[in-house]
Image (cartoon, rainbow, N blue to C red):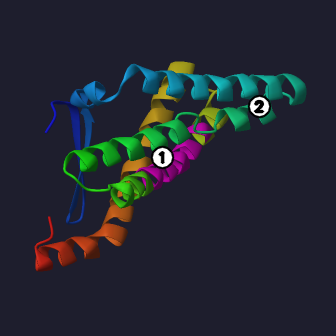
Amino acid sequence: MGWSVVQLVVSAGEVILVIELKLSSIKDTRPPEYVVRFLFGGSCTVLAGLIAKKYGPGVGGLFLAFPAIFPAGASLIESHEKMRKAKLGYDGSKRGRFAVSVESSGTSLGCVALAGFALVVWLGLAYANPFAVMLAAAAVWLLIAATLWAVHRNRVFHGRLRVRERHKIT
């Protein structure tokens, strides 16, 4: 287990969701992997800027919302899971794909929450203090993201956890 800097516990009925930021995972990432992430993210940002220059900021903003880090991050998650299993003498391909699918479900929920953030900013910036609007938008994002994840976890994974407990799968 790694050292957690931030630990947020969200309760939704009987589901407890723990959101953590683990600094220990930084040591698992090698410098070339950071280069891949930054190059891919930077390329997406430059492309969004070029689109905004040609078609306007509204269209460019849509492309800037593309999760630039996710595709590179997903490939790194898969390779890390494969390496962990390889150290134990297993293939790890299936585990790597599963880890990426879990990550992508969280990413899609975060994107829905980001739409709530964008809506608050879009509606509020013309009428209120920008700092207050950004604070309110961040609060809306956190509320939507945590609620969606709690609902998703309760609905999708709750039955699987019972199966694991019944068969004592670790």
Query: Of all residues shown, which one is farthest toward the front?
Result: 89
**Is the residue 107 above or below the residue 167 in the image?**
above
Image point (37%, 61%), residue name: 94
Please say if 145 is above or below 52. Answer: below
Say which residue appears at 80% left-offset and 35% top-offset. 59
Type of amino acid under label 1: Gly
**6 left or right, relative to 30:** left
Check disc 1 and report its element: helix, strand or loop.
helix
Residue 60 numbered tag:
2
Say which mark, if any, is on residue 110: 1
Task: Give the image quarter of residue 121.
Answer: top right
Does residue 80 appear to the left or right of 14 in the view shown? right
Category of crowding for the residue at label 2, using alpha-carbon neighbours closer than 10 angstroms: few (below 14), some (14–19), many (at least 20): some
Sequence-first disc among 2 and 1: 2
Q: Residue at x 74, y 27 (%)?
A: 47
Question: For the point 72% across and 38% down, which residue is it?
Answer: 62
Q: Residue 98, how many percent across, how many down? A: 38, 59
The range drawn in magenta is 103-118
